[in-house]
Structures are given as structure tokens and as C-alpha cells.
Image (cartoon, rainbow, N blue to C red):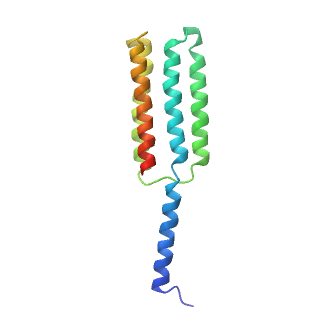
């Protein structure tokens, strides 16, 4: 019994490469949706936290954590493959988001309470970081 000819082996390798490339081409859509959902939820939650009375602070936080959990639950369930370099891009985007989120929450309560400009700037930056992360992932 003999194996494939060199030409057949090359064709099989090319077919495998095309299949892998096609699989990776659509691989990021759950992650992209997760980043966009995280950006929207966090920016809007920051605005809500800055404007709700102290007795209602738990409401936007519970909604934020509920929606974020749902978004990443979908990402975890539906993500089947990732593109090369995804981990590095994901960590960079999430680190940028985390820093901005902490600065935003600390800022609206301790550093710049009642300052609309601060909420607008940090919410815009949260949107920018997650949009940029999603854009860079989509372009890979």
C-alpha cells in the first residue's frame, strides 16, 4: 500500500491551509461582539454611576455585571477558534479597558465628583479602547 504522490500531498496541504484560513477568518466575531458589548455597557454604566443617588448605586452595577456576564457567556460558548496573536491583542485591550474602568469609577466618586467633563472623557475613552480593540481584531 502506498501513500499519496508528492503532487497529491501538496494539494492536500494546500486544502488544509485554505480550510484553516477560512476557519480563522470568521473566528473573531464572538470576541468582537464581546468587546463591543463590554465597551457599551461600561461606558453607559459609568454615566449612570455618576448620576444616580447613592441609594441606587447597586442597580447600574448589577445591570453592568449581569450584561457583561451574559456577553462573555456567549463569547465563551460560541467562540470556536481564534486568530493568531489573539491572546496578545485581547490582553492589551482588556488591560486598557481595566485601567480606564478603575480610573473612571475612582474619578467619579473621589477625584472629580459631579464633573460631567470627566465622565464624558472617560466614557469616550472606554468606547475608543474597546472599538479600537474590536477594529484591530477584525482587521487581522
Q: Quadrant of residue 134?
A: top left
Which x, y percent locates residue 32?
50, 43
| Above or below, comparing residue 31 to residue 84 in the picture | above
Residue positioned most to the bottom? 1
In the image, what residue occupies the spot 50% across and 27% down? 42
Which x, y percent locates residue 113?
42, 10
In the image, what residue occupies the spot 46% across and 53% down? 83
Which x, y percent locates residue 24?
50, 57
| Above or below, comparing residue 22 to residue 33 in the picture | below
In the image, what residue occupies the spot 46% across and 79% down? 10
Number of residue marks: 0
Q: Which quadrant is the N terminus positioned in?
A: bottom right
| Above or below, comparing residue 137 to residue 120 in the picture | below
Q: Is residue 77 left or right of residue 134?
A: right
In the image, what residue occupies the spot 49% across and 67% down? 18
| Above or below, comparing residue 29 to residue 38 in the picture | below
Quick check: can you spot residue 103? no
Quick check: can you spot residue 108? yes
Amino acid at each position: 500500500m502506498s501513500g499519496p504522490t508528492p503532487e497529491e500531498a501538496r494539494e492536500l496541504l494546500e486544502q488544509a491551509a485554505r480550510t484553516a484560513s477560512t476557519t480563522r477568518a470568521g473566528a473573531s466575531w464572538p470576541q468582537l461582539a464581546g468587546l463591543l458589548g463590554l465597551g457599551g455597557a461600561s461606558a453607559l454604566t459609568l454615566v449612570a454611576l455618576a448620576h444616580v443617588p447613592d441609594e441606587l448605586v447597586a442597580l447600574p452595577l448589577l445591570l453592568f455585571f449581569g450584561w457583561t456576564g451574559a456577553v462573555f457567556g456567549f463569547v465563551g460558548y460560541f467562540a470556536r477558534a481564534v486568530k493568531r496573536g489573539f491572546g496578545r491583542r485581547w490582553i492589551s485591550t482588556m488591560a486598557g479597558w481595566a485601567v480606564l474602568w478603575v480610573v473612571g469609577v475612582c474619578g467619579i466618586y473621589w477625584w472629580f465628583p459631579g464633573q460631567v467633563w470627566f465622565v464624558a472623557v472617560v466614557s469616550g475613552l472606554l468606547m475608543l479602547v474597546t472599538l479600537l480593540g474590536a477594529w484591530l481584531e477584525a482587521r487581522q
